[in-house]
Image: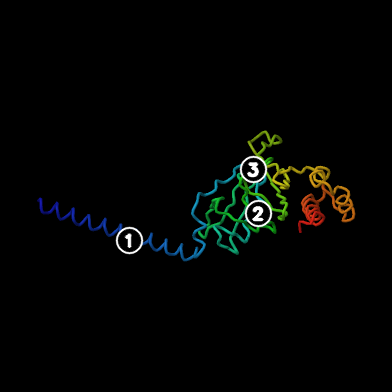
Amino acid sequence: MVRISVLLFLLGSVCLFAQDAVLGHAVDISAVEYLHVAGDQSALYYGKEQEGYWRVLNYPYLHDAQYVKARLSYRRIIYPEALLRLDWHRNELVVMSPDKRNVVLFPENVDYVELHGKHIIYFRRDNLPGCPSSGYYILLYSGQCKVFEKQTASMVRNTNNTSRVEYYFSFSTNFYLFKDGVYHNIRNKRGLLKVLHPYKRELNRFISSNNLRFRHNAQELISRTVSEYEKLSGLQ
């Protein structure tokens, strides 16, 4: 009787070992297939998955929630067609992995990204006067002076629908000019010209002759005016 029990135990162990071996083999095959699909970009797909948004009427992404091919420099390696989207609410750059996961990139590894025709960097706060908070910024101009655009998406409760709880995102934009070791928050043309002394008169003439309007296209007005200021100052 004892011999029969031992035999049954051994047979059961063999079956379990065989099942584990098959499962392990299947996992190995899946891992190999994943790495084959990911290829040289597999380093991008290590990270947390982004949580979804529920009961929202719009999304906090740059342009929309769809992934688009973008040129990404990550740890000084160029990925020319990474599938990316940028979340202005959580300050997260998200990549679509080959197995359809929404993976948040580590911001300290992001050098820059060309997304929707914009040059985006991860800005790290320093101790200089007026420095804004860390996060993803659009770099509008980069010379002796630098111009940054920061978009923020804030979640607001929708009060129009009382039958269910819904939210929407409200967007705001801030512009920062870095000049002579100081960051300036630019809110209008007057504030810009105040920072770019002593060429206020020349720059005002430049803005008028090029029909630039802060309300219509603040990005163009600020970047082109700063470029003109550097020419007048002999910085270019």
Q: Secondary structure at mark 3?
A: loop
**Which of label 3 and label 2 is nearer to you?**
2
Q: Secondary structure at mark 2?
A: strand
Q: What amino acid is found at the position of numbered circle 2 in the picture?
A: Ile
**55 versus 203 height, above or below:** above
28 vs 19, nearest the viewer: 28
Residue 15 horizontal side relative to residue 87, left or right = left
Contact between labelled residues 1 and 2, with CB atoms less than 8 Å apart: no
Q: What amino acid is found at the position of numbered circle 1 in the picture?
A: Val
- Residue with the mark numbered 3: 56
- Residue with the mark numbered 1: 22
Q: Secondary structure at mark 1?
A: helix
Spot occupied by residue 89 in the image (x, y as percentages of width and height): 63, 44
Characterize the local packing of mark 2: few (<14), some (14-19) or many (20 or more) Cα atoms within 10 angstroms.
many
Q: What amino acid is found at the position of numbered circle 3 in the picture?
A: Val
**215 versus 23 height, above or below:** above
Spot occupied by residue 149 in the image (x, y as percentages of width and height): 71, 48
User: What's the CA distance linking mark 3 and mark 1?
Assistant: 44 Å
- Residue with the mark numbered 2: 120
Spot occupied by residue 230 in the image (x, y as percentages of width and height): 78, 55
User: What's the CA distance linking mark 3 and mark 2?
Assistant: 26 Å
**Which of label 2 and label 1 is nearer to you?**
2
Quadrant of the rendering where the C terminus is positioned:
bottom right
Spot occupied by residue 175 in the image (x, y as percentages of width and height): 73, 46
